[in-house]
Image (spheres, rainbow, N blue to C red):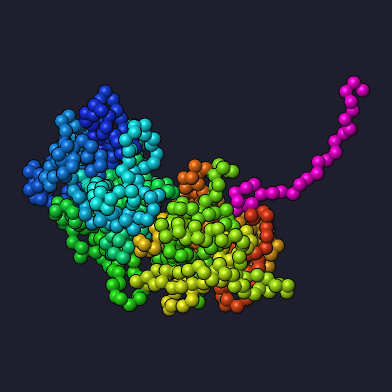
Amino acid sequence: MGVSEAVDFARNFAVMLRVRGPDPKGMKMRRHAFHQYRSGETTLSASGMLVPHTLFDAQVATTLYGHNSEDTVLVVTVASVLEPFLSPHHRHNIPQGRPELISGVQIDVMTEKTDEKSSQPTPCWIVAQLLSLIDVPASALCLQSLIEASSGLPEHEWEVGWSLASYNEPQPSKDFIQTQGRSAVERSSNANLIHKSLTRIAILSVPLSFKDLLETKVSSSSMNKRGDFLLAVGSPFGVLSPAHFFNSISVGCIANCYPPNSSDGSLLMVDIRSLPGMEGSPVFSEHACLTGILIRPLRQNTSGAEIQLVIPWEAIVRASSGLLQMWPQNTMEGSYNQQENSYVEGKAPFLDTIKLSVMSSNEHEPVSYGCSSPLPIEKAMASICLVTVGDGIWASGVLLNSQGLILTNAHLLEPWRFSKTHASGGGYGTSSEKIPFMLKGATSFYNGIECNQESQTSPTVKAILYPFATNEQGTYHKLNPTYYNHINLRVRLDHVTPPLWCDAKVLYVCKGPWDVALLQLKSVPDKLSPIVMDFSRPTTGSKAYVIGHGLFGPKHGFFPSVCSGVVAKVVEAKTPQSYQSIHTHEQFSAMLETTAAVHPGASGGAVINSDGHMIGLVTSNARHGGGAVIPNLNFSIPCAALAPIFKFSKDMQNLSVLRILDEPNEYLSSVWALMRPSTPKHHPIPGPPQFPSGL
């Protein structure tokens, strides 16, 4: 099944919900990014999914809700769109049975089709009933653990929801998850309520009969894999104009899973465009297999980075008390044809639950990720490592050879050279007063320990120190700077389970225009998986994956995250003279711009093509002058510029090959400073003589 067919299939199940109710004081829209308010009535909207009859147990539905399910279809959505209209008692104490709404509330659902015999889509509103609210404890616990692992600074505050809307009322407009400033009991209680609310699911019913329309006839299947294509169908800002926004399509990929070492993660982080009103959207794989339900995102206050979240369908099923099902009732898992990798026609499941096993041995074994990736991307992931400096600063790195040589960014070690400073909780940044938007090193967030480290190290480190320098004969000799002897460098390798921590030392820091450094593992383990580089010029518009440890550091235990996009632009320059011995073309790739999301901590990660080969080193992204990061505008060093490092990595004997990188180049420096490259000055051509007027 192609993407267009998957879109057509998915749209049959996607719906938009509209909830209208009395709101004399205009309080119901709080914590919602958009709404309609007219004459004391508030209207909210979200997205949802029609549940096929084959994916819920009719007898359980009758027992739970006491009505005949033959003439109704269940709808799954997020509870947040309904909670403001619950009765005061049920708002604070979610019932096991049918929740009670305040008087005058009406719930409507818009579907693609309302008549099984109709050949043309005719969206219209249908009255729906709220049946139950379901807590998903596994997903709530994952979310709570995720937030608590980020605690340490007041600036590490998480907001629930989007940052697109401005609010005029003095009351808080979003749910806040703060890590400091409250007593332990109050903080724990409030956070627990927010985690439950964010992951809570609502079950509704609509009087429809879509037996033919909702039959599951897809014969392909796919597993939930990091880097895999995702398709969401939702209605952003739908209530404002359904004609414009109803059942819009958004695509992306699975970025990571939580818990990270689980084969059946209860929370998915996805790299997908999500806008207010899309919460509740069904999310499908490329082959129209149901992945889960999109919920509201988390947004970090310091960087503005949004984490899009999906509750896997499996987690919802486990929490539904037997109402919902993983497999169609008339389908057996055994009908899967292992040889043909497909299901027998007419016996296909609506979703795929095949998982890869995760090694649980105490031995260090090669990882079989619970949310593993397509083979080329999975191989590249094994080459990406986590690099830490001191107790809290981290970045990513790329393994270059089996001798433990690691490539990362120089600004991790020498931030002052790149106009970046260790700011409390703010990563590396430049002054926003000089340019309307600026480069931001996507390299670190800090906890309280790092702030102490900053106050101790920043005043004393003034000079630019290099571990290698040239002598009069032009050969390299090793320096022994005090600074590098006193920093604690550690590298976590994720190609084995449990992950393996190794001490490392600084081998080389570029003093030219390139933001690169080399580290060496002090103890080299077996079974390393070096990256494969592609030195050719990437094609503009070609697929690009960013793999790195963005946003979440060592406390979370995540494997590298994957974000997908395209190569937006290849910035070229005249080939530097020092490169002409290894690069014969007149033009030279100086910078890659991609649309894959890059967050703080991803610096030093790899940009990968569809073949799983590295095409660039993640270096920085942009941010607005006000400080907000622009994740999908980022910059990487092309592998063509890294050719000397690759040459050195082969035998690690000839350090002089790295001299090419250290050659000063004003043009390249201006490119990486996002400044207009300097051009030779032209003397004006003398014009004709000017005579005084009147002569």
Residue 601 x, y percent position in the rendering = 45, 58
| Magenta highlight range | 670-695
Residue at 46% x, 77% y is 524
Relative image position of residue 560 (x, y in whole percent): 40, 62
Query: Which of the 4 quarters of the picture holds residue 81?
Result: top left
Position of residue 369 relative to residue 253, above or below, is below
Which residue reaches farthest right?
695
The number of numbered discs placed on residues in the rendered structure image is 0
Left or right: where 669 falls relative to 126: right
User: Residue drawn at (18%, 58%), measured in percent from left and top?
Assistant: 331
Q: Nearer the viewer, residue 662 or 488?
A: 488
Residue 276 visible in rendering: yes
Q: Residue at x 88, y 30 (%)?
A: 690
Instruction: Tell me the residue at 62%/61% (across/down).
Output: 463
Quadrant of the image containing the C terminus: top right
**Does 406 appear above or below 256?**
below
**560 or 416, nearer to the observer:** 416
Question: Quadrant where the N terminus lies?
Answer: bottom left
Side of 643 relative to 313 (left or right): right
Residue 208 placed where, x, y %? 17, 39
Where is residue 56? Give x, y as percent: 16, 51
- Residue 199 in view (yes/no): no
Residue 673 on the magenta segment: yes
> Which secondary structure is most common in the magenta stretch?
loop
343 or 361, which lies in front? 361
Q: Is residue 10 magenta?
A: no
